[in-house]
Image: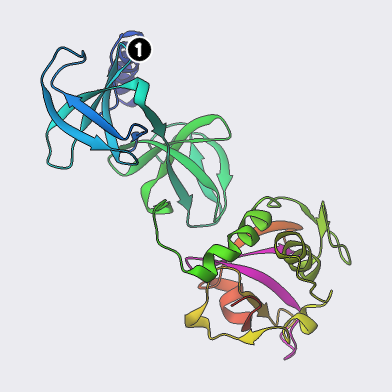
Amino acid sequence: MKKRALIPVFAAFMALTLNISHPFANSYKKIEIKANVLNVRSENNTSSDIISKLSKGDQVPIIETKDGWYKIKLDNGNEGWVSGEYVQEKQTIGIINGNDVNFREGDSLESPIIETLEIGNEVEILDKNSDWYKVKFNEQIGYIYSSFIKIKQENKAVSRGDKRIIKVYEVANSKIGKKYVWATSGPDTFDCSGFTMYVYKTAMGIDLPHSSKSQSKVGTSVSKDELKLGDLVFFDTSRDGSINHVGIYIGDGNFIHASSAKARVMISSLSEGYYLKTYKCARRVVE
């Protein structure tokens, strides 16, 4: 039954690939307007009627592309065409919200696993089919169950303090997968406090001591329900009452750290399992 079901799906895919017009039929592929004002026309040519106008920076979903034009869906539900000369395609990014999430070849639990993804991994959303997202990750295309993906909000407002510390996230995120080695502080191997020390020095020029216990005395204390991007979070992983592990909070209940248990820099959740039980406190280095 499943093998027979694959035949029409494959045929439909080939029809899309070979057709001059490429319908996307979803809201995940968008364009951003680059012209100050851009006419939206009833057909894909400059002789057709103008039915609306878009402004620079507007983003709208793509329905179809044809002969250098984009068929789009407007906020009022109407459809029209804009010239591709004045727009730029935008990706819709999804963020993995669990650990050991299966990235599969097809949209079923029986489909072979390409690889497993971790909290914080970013994927490009291509489409959604029932309860599955079709995504691209490391140039491979596959499927992930929808409950394990959160759509990244590109236009989410951030505070002035957040804007100053975005570089901390960028530097930290660039080191995901690097090896854990005790008593090292980068650029390619780290222990936990060496990682936070490297990130803050590289991103902000701020010197932190090479010790999680010492770092827990830097800056100002922050309650767990008031955590912001860039705050240092501390743990008692030996469960002897002392602080011996540190990471950097990156939002949505997650933090990035050099894990000795996993032997690499990775993203973990504060709200589940081991790190929920061993969490001790947090400090804000930059207001």
Residue furthest bottom in the image: 241
The number of numbered badges drawn on the structure is 1
Dot 1 alpha-carbon crowd within 10 angstroms: few under 14, some 14 to 19, many 20 or more: few
The residue depicted at 13 percent of the width and 15 percent of the height is: 48
The residue depicted at 63 percent of the width and 58 percent of the height is: 167
| Region of the chain picked out in magenta, as a range | 239-261
Residue 256 counted in the magenta span: yes
As rendered, which of 70 and 173 lies closer to the eye?
Answer: 70
Residue furthest right in the image: 183
- x, y percent for residue 117: 56, 47
As rendered, which of 19 and 6 lies closer to the eye?
Answer: 19
The correct choice, above or below, for 27 with respect to 273 in the image is above
- x, y percent for residue 283: 64, 82
Q: Identify the element where label 1 is drawn.
A: helix
Q: Which residue is mark 1?
A: 14
Horizontal side of 222 relative to 109 (left or right) equals right
Residue 213 counted in the magenta span: no
Please state, as top left, top right, bottom left or bottom right, where the C terminus lies in the image.
bottom right
- x, y percent for residue 38: 26, 30
The residue depicted at 89 percent of the width and 67 percent of the height is: 183
As rendered, which of 2 and 113 lies closer to the eye?
Answer: 113
- x, y percent for residue 40: 19, 27
Horizontal side of 98 relative to 52 (left or right) equals right
* Colouring rule applied to residues: rainbow
Quadrant housing residue 1: top left
Q: What residue type is disc 1 on?
A: Met
Quadrant housing residue 197: bottom right
